[in-house]
Amino acid sequence: MVGARPQFIKSALLLRELERRQIERRLVHTGQHYDHAMSQVFFDELGLPQPDYSLGCGSASHAVQTAEMMRALEPVFERERPSYVVVFGDTNTTLAGALTAAKLRIPVVHVEAGLRSFNRAMPEEVNRVVADHVASILCAPSERAAAQLASEGIRAGVHVVGDLMIDLVKIVRDALPERPPILERLALTRGSYALATIHRAANTDDPHAFADIVSGLRRLPLPVIFPVHPRSAPLVTAFDVGAGDGIVPIEPLPYEDTIALAAHARVVLTDSGGLQKEAVFLGVPCVTLRNETEWAETLDDGWNALAGTDPSAIERLALRPKPLMASRSFIGDGACAQRIAEILIERAPASPSNACGAQPPKTATVS
Ligand code: UD1
């Protein structure tokens, strides 16, 4: 199941691995993200197969968006009766997929299990907690995440598999050209600009929070490249962001351009979970525009720092010296997708044909 931008990225290597092993699967796109730049761009760039089901459930309130997805998913799951439903991360797509499958008693596989910000005001935190508690197979990115699950009483079905996003960023980083085209296009030199992204509800639903972040960004003595998520676009206009203030608002970027910009930035400032760990993995200091992070390991060794929305903290932390010690938080051994695929094959419930003594298929149907 995919639906939102980070899920197109997280699913890419797993879909390739399922293809390689000829594991039968259906791809469902809920339509949570639907703009070309938020969706199709990633299908094209990452070579994702076109979805078998496109549900077209776009924007709405949380209840309506989640409910529409569940209504649309139920007949799909009933028709396909997959061995598993695989959900990624913490979005409303994750929640809808996990709940619908659990109610149909189809085993849920949650990729990125065990992460917690401990802030239940975040819609994503509610989504992760629910997905973890209804999942049968929990693919945790780290021992820390597995320990969190254990502390909540979830021990069965937990596997530490690594991180699909880190495996992908490593591949893309290693293939970046010497002079990435996005740096040419924006006339940037390495290490002389900041990269910023803002999209969390807490920072975009409250104009004061957004204004405070912008005021922090305006204090930085270097250009701030700001790919604007659709959620932030009205605020960019309302606060005249980019009108001679050193901030450069641009359209949402494809994946490789984002990684290229992050890899060569002096600092990354973001409220995104994915970009925090990508920055740390790429050896670029990060300032998180929130008061907490579900990726606690990014804070180890000082590579990430929590600024909230305080303009002075944003300025001070953005200009802090680069940590001396390299981060050891995210290794990325490239084997996460293989591990998940192996778990799916090993744990696949017996199909009716097995019961009749037929050769057990080495396949699992995955939505
Ligand atoms: C969602 C996820 C968040 C994830 C983020 C990545 C939830 C609760 N949040 O947040 O965890 O980090 O995606 O981007 O699921 N919009 C468009 N075009 C699009 C997509 C969205 O215009 O293609 C606009 C809509 O007006 C919508 C708003 O952006 O109301 C927010 O979209 P939504 O899907 O509710 O959540 P995100 O903020 O993108």
Image (cartoon, helix red, strand yellow):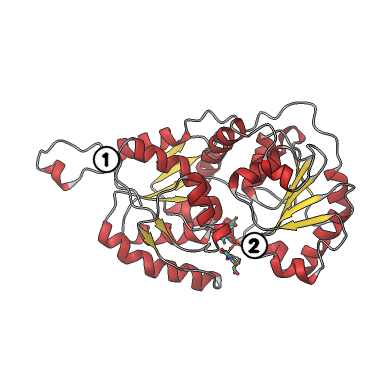
> Can the viewer see residue 296?
no
Q: Residue at x 30, y 41 (%)?
A: 23
Q: Tell whether 11 sits left or right of 366.
A: right
Gap between marks 2 and 1 measured at Cα: 40 Å
Q: Is mark 2 within 8 Å of ligand 1?
A: no
Kind of residue sitting beneath label 1: Thr
Q: Tell me where residue 312 appears, x and y as whole percent.
A: 89, 52
Residue 86 x, y percent position in the rendering: 40, 49
Residue displayed at 47% across by 44% down: 12
Q: Are marks 2 and 1 in contact (CB under 8 Å)?
A: no
Q: Position of residue 114 (x, y in %)?
A: 53, 45
Residue 363: assigned label? 1
Q: Which residue is mark 2?
A: 121
Position of 308 with respect to 108 (left or right) is right
**Res 348 label:** none
Instruction: Check disc 2 and report its element: helix, strand or loop.
Output: loop
